[in-house]
Amino acid sequence: MFNLNKTKEEEAVQSICIKQIQFADQQQDFNKRLSKTGRRSRSFSQSSTVNYNSDCSEDATSPRDRQQRSSKGHQDFCIKNIRQAGLGRREIAIAEQEMPALMALRKRAEGEKPLAGAKVVGCTHITAHTAVLMETLSALGAQCRWAACNIYSTQNAAAAALAEEGFPVFAWKGESEDDFWWCIDHCVSLEAWQPNMILDDGGDLTHWIDKKYPNIFKMMKGIVEESVTGVHRLYQLSKAGRLCVPAMNINDSVTKQKFDNLYCCRESILDGLKRLTDVMFGGKQVVVCGYGEVGKGCSAALKAMGSIVYITEVDPICALQAWYGERERERERERERERERERERERERERERERERERERDMNYLCLCLSLFQHGLLQTGQALALIELYNAPEGRYNKDVYLLPKKMDEFVAGLHLPTFDAHLTELTDEQAKYLGLTKTGPFKPNYYRWGNTHTHSHLKHIMHIYTVKAGMNMNSNVIWRSSMFLWLTVRVFIAGTNPWK
């Protein structure tokens, strides 16, 4: 009996030893499965290693040197990697939820197809919100070809999702300057496809067509421009008599100036600086260059975080606005500001500042963090501007630059109100008659600027009267009477007489 038990114990020990040897062999075999970089692969299949190596080779190859094909057989695009389309589609789905006005416009006008026959060539930031705009234009009947307006801002996944759906997209993150112009050229050089509408951001696409393909303007119905730089270039073309088609200035629309420039910057400035520097704002001394809509939003946000804000301005009206907003703190810090100015003169030189501005222009897009909701405001206006220019009867618009009509601005804002469960108060017939308005708008005259001046030199003989909405103290009375005197003086000058003689 004793020997039998011993035999069973020996068999049990032997069994344990065999299992340990087998487990050790499995561990040794596991350790041998290493990837090319020396790390363990997340999957032990042969295909995963092949995919990893192929991804590395694609990263080293320019998209211009690779032929890609979507699952539907489309090849008319040039992007980083078509296999990122699934991720891009999820990002676009999230963007659609944050852009209610654009989706409402798509739903309302999809049956009418107001852009049927339109061929829109675009040059903007290619991101998820731009994808929502492009798909909206397509749903309204337009054909689109797109390139990026900035070499850093392209979201490769969103571009892949667009290419997968058949949109000709030519953009990827990290383009060279040669790639940038190559992509723009591939949007407009196709012989079988002649664009008749331009949606531009910065004016590069308009400049390229004017320089390389001026005959395209003969078929063009209009240009929609959203940026300060692009609008400035359009006014230069108009002044020189070289603007061949009507252009719509989206940058100076109220929904762009107030919501995108003021309210959006008030939130995005903190987010961008936090991501870039990870610093505490309390007690920091910050210089804000300019007190326009962007400057007002940035300074308000920085002051709320406890920063000491200094403002530089060349416009006396904006400088006065800045002073009224900052006067209490400015008086307390007058001596400190003088010392800071002196130190600034000693350590800063104009040449260094110029270099810094050049670097900041590129870094602006590396820290881009505007909300999708704000983009929805802007791009709803862009879509409406394209519809207006494309369907306008001949003679309504000359070869000049136009502001977005007030009626469209109000329509864009109205599309966003249901998102907040907000409702408008409707005027009665007597109220509308007394105010000289229609019950459906527009509710403000064309010269009403919501508090911000229009500085373009093409607007001559127009002077707005500004009053400070404060208590009826001496300062406000002086400002009011001075503005009235200046207005009367300007009116006399316009009439052709000199009041000083």
Image (cartoon, rainbow, N blue to C red):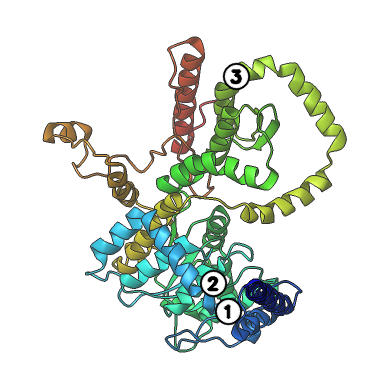
Q: CA distance from mark 2 to mark 1?
A: 9 Å
Circle 2 residues within 10 Å: few <14, some 14–19, many ≥20: many
Q: Residue at x 44, y 65 (%)?
A: 90
Q: Are marks 1 and 3 in contact (CB under 8 Å)?
A: no
Q: Residue furthest top?
A: 473
Q: Report x, y in % for residue 383.
A: 37, 62
Q: Quadrant of the N terminus?
A: bottom right
Mark 3 element type: helix
Closer to viewer: mark 2 or mark 3: 2
| Residue 10: percent from left, percent from top | 68, 75
Given residues 264 and 317, the one toward you in this image is 264
Give the amino acid type for the residue marked by disc 2 in the picture.
Ala
List the residue tagged with mark 2: 147
Residue type, label 1: Asp
- Mark 1 — residue? 185
SS label for mark 1: helix
Q: Secondary structure at mark 2?
A: strand
Upstream in sequence: badge 2 or badge 3: 2
Q: Is residue 260 visible?
A: yes
Find disc 3 in the rendering and name its residue: 327
In screen coordinates, is 73 left or right of 312?
left
Residue 146 seen from this side: no
Residue in the picture at 58% in, 88% down: 67
> Which label number is shown at residue 209?
none
Answer left or right for 485 relative to 172: left
